Image (spheres, helix red, strand yellow):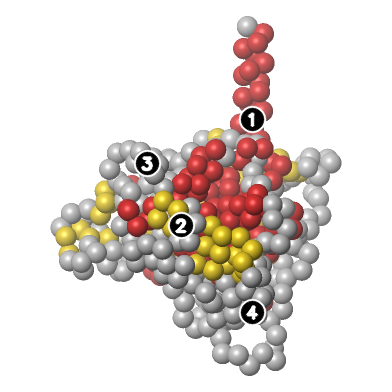
Amino acid sequence: MKNLKCILLLIQVFIFQYGFTQKNVDIQEILSSIQDSTTKAVLANPATFRYQIVYTQINRDKNGVPHFKNYTLQVDPDKYFNPASMVKMPLAFLSLEKLHELNKPEINKHTTILFDSSYQRQVSMYADSSSKNKKPSIAHFIKRAFLISENDPYNRMYQFIGQSDINKKLLQKGYSSTKITRQFMGYTEDQNRHTNGIRFVNDNNTLLYEQAPQYNTDSFSFGAPILIGNAHWNSKDELVQGPFDFTKHNNISLEDMQKMLQAIVFPTSVPLKSRFNISEEDRQFLLQFLSQYPSETNYPKYDTEHFYDSYVKFFFQDSTHSMPKNIRVFNKVGWAYGFLTDVSYVLDTLNNIDYMLSATVYVNSDGVVNDSKYDEETVGFPFLKQIGNAFYEYELKRKRNYHPILKNQVPKYEERDQNDTRPSIKNADN
């Protein structure tokens, strides 16, 4: 009996620090402050809009050590949503981990990486016009994937890590909901199992390391069919009367994505096995580009009218397209097939508050999947903005036992060179 009490106590401690508690009433009280009729209609119809919310409260003790408490609303790992570009986040983390574990001093995230075409429909890559030296690198892929959520960097990181290692490593870390099996290339299942031959070279084009083309022989258990919608457009541009099959698409639960981000922002707050094996320098690099704005970045030089500061900050996106100077949002977003998702850590250094907020919502009133006609502008983005504001206002008023002075972990952001006359990038596949 004594041993059982000890085990139960340990479980309670673990849940307090790392786990997810179901206390819907707290979140509902926070959301009750929202007056926007569209958002209220979404909240009243969870089955239609398939929304899920994870709110992570952060409280410091007298020594300044943060403690985390998680609250959820409508969260269910079996309730599918398409993660879309959210999959770029773990691949960025795993890419830096793989570089770190290669343990080759001459190779780092800035080293030129070249991709050969080694199988059907594969695309080679030997240059990147948006980088300063016009060459591809893992660092530049991460910038492009985070700043405006470009797609090809995801494909290249997928090819570098390999389909097998992506899934094995995330499973080993405890992210058991995760299946990442597809590139954003329109490939068949077989083509997604094959990844390109890769070479790292130095500035003189001397070979430093070569990775042979890979083929994943692992099997996947996809579980019950995931069918959504009333009709869909197929790969032949034919309208099919029947739901779209997401069964073999990429999949990550909202809880796992929240924990992955927490593992980078606050590594010691998650179990050791759930952390990413990267250097502190690489962690700082991730934090910088999870929170840096396109208007601050020189390479790539994005057009700031289209790719404005709040472009991938859904909880703070409004008509001004600007971000408050006292707030930094460390996050990743995804949008596809009518699903909109944001997983964020919010830091306000003026009011000394920080918290994590993750949410997903499905906005597809016509029920037709893959027709590029979704209710993002009229329902999805306003919904995420409204709930983002509700939690921010709640945090401003929330009582705390200790009020530490918070600082941004990122020591310095870039500044756009105002004398740079290069044309800006106005269009990107994202």
Task: Determine the residue located farthest toward the right in the rendered image.
Answer: 63
Q: Nearer the viewer, mark 3 or mark 1?
A: 3
Q: Is residue 222 left or right of residue 230?
A: right
Can you give x and y, in whole percent of width and height, for residue 258 in the image? 56, 48
Residue placed under numbered mark 2 in the picture: 213
Dot 4, how many residues are within 10 Å of its Cα: few (below 14), some (14-19), or many (20+)? few
Q: Callout 1 environment at 10 Å: few (<14), some (14 to 19), or many (20+)? A: some
Do callouts 4 and 3 mark residues in contact (Cβ within 8 Å)? no
Mark nearest the camera among 2 and 4 is 2
> Tag 2's secondary structure?
loop
Instruction: Determine which quarter of the picture holds residue 61.
Output: top right
Residue 111: give x, y in percent of width and height: 65, 67
Task: Give the residue at mark 3.
Answer: 220
- Which label's residue is closer to the chain start, 3 or 2? 2
Q: Residue at x 61, y 52 (%)?
A: 98
Picture coordinates of residue 57 (x, y %)?
64, 45
Q: Return the residue at label 1.
A: 14
